[in-house]
Image (cartoon, rainbow, N blue to C red):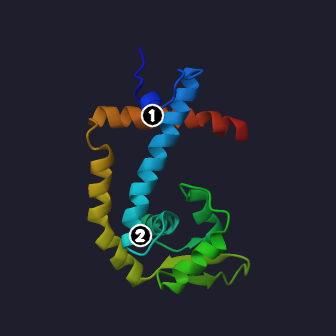
Amino acid sequence: MTSNRLQKELKKKQPFAAPEQEAVLNILRTSDQFQNRLGRLFRQFGLTPSQYNVLRILRGEGKPLPCLEIGTRMIQVVPAMTGLLDRLEKQELIERERCTQDRRVVYIELTDKAQALLKEMDEPVQTLEKNLIGHLSQRELKELSRLLEKARQSLADDND
């Protein structure tokens, strides 16, 4: 038996047409609420979620990355990567350096200011993540991730 919680939240009079519809709407609703909360936190530090994502990717790599590589690692597709990087550069959070072997390639590197900002953000981000989803057990979290990855597999199959 399924829960009617989403149906009540959305004030939907009729049951969902199919379990797939209910699941997709649950994912979208949860994603929207999580993004809103994370977005609020990032704004406190003068960043958008996409800007934070770029900084997180660069810190995780530990070395400069080409623009295109950063784009492939983004959580959300960003159509205007150049504009996003322009804003980070204006905030003095990244530096760009053109590749000497191939002038079309531009490497992006974190500044010390960005490293300090990320360090300052680590604890508040972790706290928010725990507040959002920490009530699930470790086993439930692993299962949730497994199921979401499995759900995305249909998209990967479309791209093959």
The tag on residue 43 is: 2
Q: Quadrant of the C terminus?
A: top right
- Residue 160 visible in the shown view: no
Please state which of residues 128 and 119 is positioned toward the viewer in this rendering: 128
Which secondary structure, mark 2? Answer: helix
For the residue marked with disc 2, what is the amino acid? Arg
User: In screen coordinates, is 55 left or right of 104?
Assistant: left
Q: Where is residue 35 drawn, in percent x and y?
A: 45, 54
Of label 1 and label 2, which has the lower sequence position?
A: 2
Q: Where is residue 133 drawn, in percent x and y?
A: 32, 44
Q: Quadrant of the N terminus?
A: top left
Question: How far apart are the two marked residues, 1 and 2, measured between alpha carbons?
Answer: 30 Å
User: In screen coordinates, is 86 left or right of 114?
Assistant: right
Is 52 drawn above or below residue 108 in the view shown? above
Identified at 51% across, 29% down, the residue is: 12
Is 79 drawn above or below residue 103 in the view shown? above
Residue density around tag 2, few if under 14, some if 14–19, many if 20 or more, within 10 Å: few
The tag on residue 146 is: 1
Is 64 drawn above or below residue 19 in the view shown? below
For the residues labelled 1 and 2, say whether their Cβ atoms are less than 8 Å apart.
no
User: In screen coordinates, is 25 left or right of 5?
Assistant: right
Which secondary structure, mark 1? Answer: helix
Query: Hey, which quadrant is residue 120 in on the image?
Result: bottom left
Q: Where is residue 75 drawn, in percent x and y?
A: 53, 55
Please state which of residues 27 and 85 is positioned toward the viewer in this rendering: 27
For the residue marked with disc 1, what is the amino acid? Arg
- Residue 129 visible in the shown view: yes
